[in-house]
């Protein structure tokens, strides 16, 4: 089976909840202006919703029921993620996103930046409706950390980072939102023992980004992050941006180690359909 087939099989375990997240996002853009039409198309285009899938599976493995607030929270996480993608495409001068022209390609950088800000403003309104100071504080901190991660990446272009610097940047850019997707959901559920969940989501999120970094090199040899001066694990291990393939195996090993550590946490959960789905989901990230 392909990744998509395996992933779709896992998603069926929480299909109703994921569809509710999609519907929630769509309803936020029922009355649209001209720019909102493009934003709505972007937000409702086919996507993995992997943060929501991960979170719902973990919640259900703990026996926590998914309610309207949980749906709203995962919709907020999706909005934050998509706003960051819109802004990233401007920075990276990307022309394609999800097999379609990116917002900056369709509308120009100026409108794309404002469009990303509009998505964030929608997320802020929805955060306020949750009326939970802890959630508000955590997501405000998440915004900051994601921005710092992007700044670190941009300001260190064409420099080979240390492995520690790469992992920190990877956590800030990607891992922190996976972490908050799950720990925020547990906060809403009144679940106070978050240490294991936080560790799992952090490892899972870092591994997910490492997987993307490796695929960027392996699957796009003529147009990848190297041309933009973004040096990831393969370059760190090879020591030379001109020969990243010599560092691929060590980069794969690093990625798979993070997946293994994430699975160790999952193994501590009680046996269930959802625990097994989480283990399969984690295994999909390996290369």
Image (tube, helix red, strand yellow):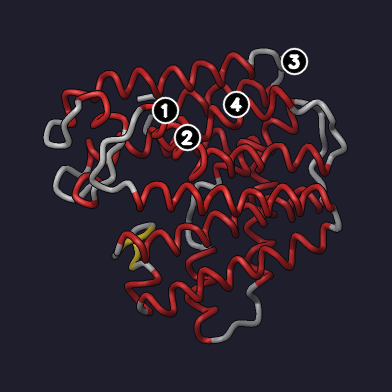
Q: Which residue is mark 3?
A: 270
Asked whether 71 or 210 is in front, the reply is 210
Q: Report the mark closest to the observer, 4 or 2.
A: 2
Residue depicted at x 40% and y 71%: 103
Q: Report the mark closest to the observer, 3 or 2.
A: 2
Q: Are marks 4 and 2 in contact (CB under 8 Å)?
A: no
Q: Quadrant of the N terminus?
A: top left
Alpha carbon separation for disc pair 4 and 1: 27 Å
**Badge number at residue 5:** none
Q: Secondary structure at mark 1?
A: helix
Residue depicted at x 71% and y 14%: 271
Alpha carbon separation for disc pair 2 and 1: 6 Å
Q: Which residue is mark 2?
A: 168
**Badge number at residue 278:** 4
Alpha carbon separation for disc pair 4 and 3: 12 Å
Q: Earlier in the sequence, mark 3 or mark 2?
A: 2
Q: Report the mark closest to the observer, 3 or 1.
A: 1
Residue 109, by quadrant, is: bottom left
**Badge number at residue 164:** 1
Give the answer, above or below, for where 178 lies relative to 90. Answer: above
Residue depicted at x 16% and y 42%: 221
Give the answer, above or below, for where 33 lies relative to 106. Answer: below
């Amino acid at each position: 089976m392909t990744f998509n087939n395996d992933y779709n099989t896992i998603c069926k375990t929480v299909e109703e909840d994921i569809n509710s997240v999609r519907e929630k996002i769509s309803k936020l853009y029922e009355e649209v202006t001209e720019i909102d039409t493009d934003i709505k198309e972007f937000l409702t285009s086919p996507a993995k919703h992997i943060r929501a899938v991960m979170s719902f599976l973990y919640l259900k493995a703990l026996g926590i029921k998914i309610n309207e607030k949980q749906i709203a929270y995962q919709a907020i996480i999706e909005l934050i993620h998509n706003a960051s993608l819109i802004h990233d495409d401007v920075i990276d001068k990307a022309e394609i996103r999800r097999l379609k022209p990116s917002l900056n390609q369709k509308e120009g950088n100026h409108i794309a930046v404002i469009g990303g800000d509009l998505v964030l403003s929608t997320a802020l309104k929805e955060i306020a409706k949750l009326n939970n100071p802890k959630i508000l504080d955590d997501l405000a901190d998440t915004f900051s950390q994601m921005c710092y991660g992007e700044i670190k990446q941009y300001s260190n272009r064409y420099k080979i980072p240390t492995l520690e610097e790469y992992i920190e940047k990877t956590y800030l850019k990607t891992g922190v939102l996976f972490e908050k997707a799950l720990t925020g959901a547990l906060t809403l559920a009144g679940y106070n023992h978050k240490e294991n969940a936080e560790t799992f989501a952090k490892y899972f999120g870092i591994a997910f980004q490492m997987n993307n970094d490796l695929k960027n090199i392996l699957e796009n040899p003529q147009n990848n992050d190297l041309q933009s001066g973004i040096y990831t694990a393969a370059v760190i291990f090879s020591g030379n941006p001109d020969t990243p393939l010599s560092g691929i195996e060590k980069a794969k090993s690093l990625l798979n180690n993070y997946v293994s550590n994430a699975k160790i946490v999952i193994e501590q959960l009680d046996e269930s359909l959802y625990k097994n789905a989480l283990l399969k989901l984690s295994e999909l990230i390996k290369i």
